[in-house]
Image (tube, rainbow, N blue to C red):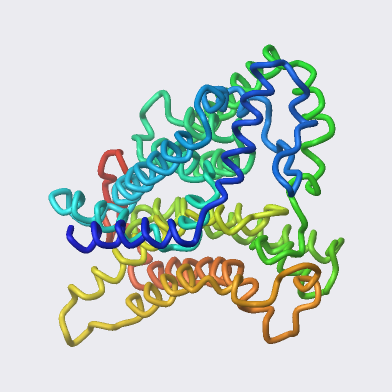
Amino acid sequence: MVAALVSLVAYAVVRHFVGTSMIDMLVYQAEGRAVVHGTDLYAIRVSEWALPATYPPFAAMLFVPTSWVGVGLLRMLITGGNVILLGVMAWLSCRLVGWPRRELRPTAVVLATGLGVWLEPVWTTLRYGQVNLALACLVLWDLTRSDAHRGKGVGIGIAAAIKLTPGLFAVYLLLTGRVRAAFTAFGAFLACTALGWIAMPGASHGFWTTYVFDSSRVGRTEIVDNQSLRGAVARLLHTTDPGVAGLLVGVAAAVLGLAVAVRAGRSASWLPRAEAWGVVCTAITGLLVSPISWTHHWVWCVPLLLLLAAEAAQERSRPQAVRRRRWRTIAAATAFGFCCYGMWLVPHKGPRDQHLPDWQLAPAAVYSLLGIAVLGVAALRIRNRRAAGGTAGTVPAQRPGGRRQAPAAR
């Protein structure tokens, strides 16, 4: 507890001296004002970088309350809210992973919140005033509910209506046999989108027919801020548009990543923490294949690190004769990757992102490489568990919020 408090105080001090632009918060505020005043949502430009609105009209409607307060107060509210959401995300991640045991979870949440602010995706989310933590909490809240819950899928649908990429979790639900939840997510998405059409028909027509297909509005593909595979390929080829190469790499990652995620999600009878592996792999797949995945989109490192910590804890509890250190090594390496700020250590001002020397390409794509590595580790984990316990029934498993599943017959 003391460590978490000291960490948060240190974060506040460093944040004060480093400074925070909260630039995305200003864009959200401008979107909320555009809704209130009936101005052209997608014509607004904010700050010296002329940042445009990039989310659907439904999201802009949710940003209306930001227009009611001044920038100074809004900075405090958004920062405090995001720190609270980090704690909520840690709590939901513990539920997803099923670790630690319930009486220890409050301590784990406090530590994850206090120390998690130093993870680069979380730091950048707080620095820009982003909504990533809120969207992740919506998805995790949905996925940690029982499959029997009639409302399961609503959170994913709402998150997808705000920002399209969470829609991949509905695909995950569908492919893992939770058809009702998948269609509930789709229905929630349609309902929220319809609200946007009713309130802002002109903006909705413009977004869904034009702006949604224009990734240039979001930003440049080749800059190191973009940690998707498309960005990594663009830097590798020293181009602003990776073209067919970027498309093929993205398609391959989508197919293989979803295959691993679905395989994990369907292996609950013999794979410990199967649902957690499936959810994390789905999140990573979405981040890898998205045309642009800014570093702050990778806040899914929080449930990933808690999952790896759970694997390491189980490994450490084994008898000395059969104990290994592989999960502790993997967890430590992953935590280092998300705390090293590697993409910011290479020269990236101006056009330098497009002309990085070969030895700088790896740190410039550190999250993409970590994502690929995690999918590989997950695939090996599934294969090894199937070989060792492969006859289903060795691990009576339980989905988060669900009933314990009876072991299948050998």
Query: Which residue lies at the image location 78% right of the left edge and 67% below the top edge?
Result: 350
What is the quadrant of the N terminus in the image?
Answer: bottom left
Vertical comparison of 323 with 150: above or below: below
Return the residue nearer the eye: 379 or 61: 61
Residue 353, how many percent across, how many down? 75, 71
Q: Quadrant of residue 209?
A: top right
Vertical comparison of 162 with 215: above or below: above
Query: Which residue lies at the image location 77% right of the left edge and 57% below the top edge?
Result: 220
Residue 361, how many percent across, how many down? 69, 78
What is the quadrant of the C terminus in the image?
Answer: bottom left
Residue 287, how many percent across, how many down? 60, 55
Query: Which residue lies at the image location 71% right of the left edge and 36% below the top edge?
Result: 53
Vertical comparison of 191 with 325: above or below: above
Residue 271 appears in the figure? no
Residue 342 appears in the figure? yes
Q: Is residue 86 left or right of residue 262?
A: left
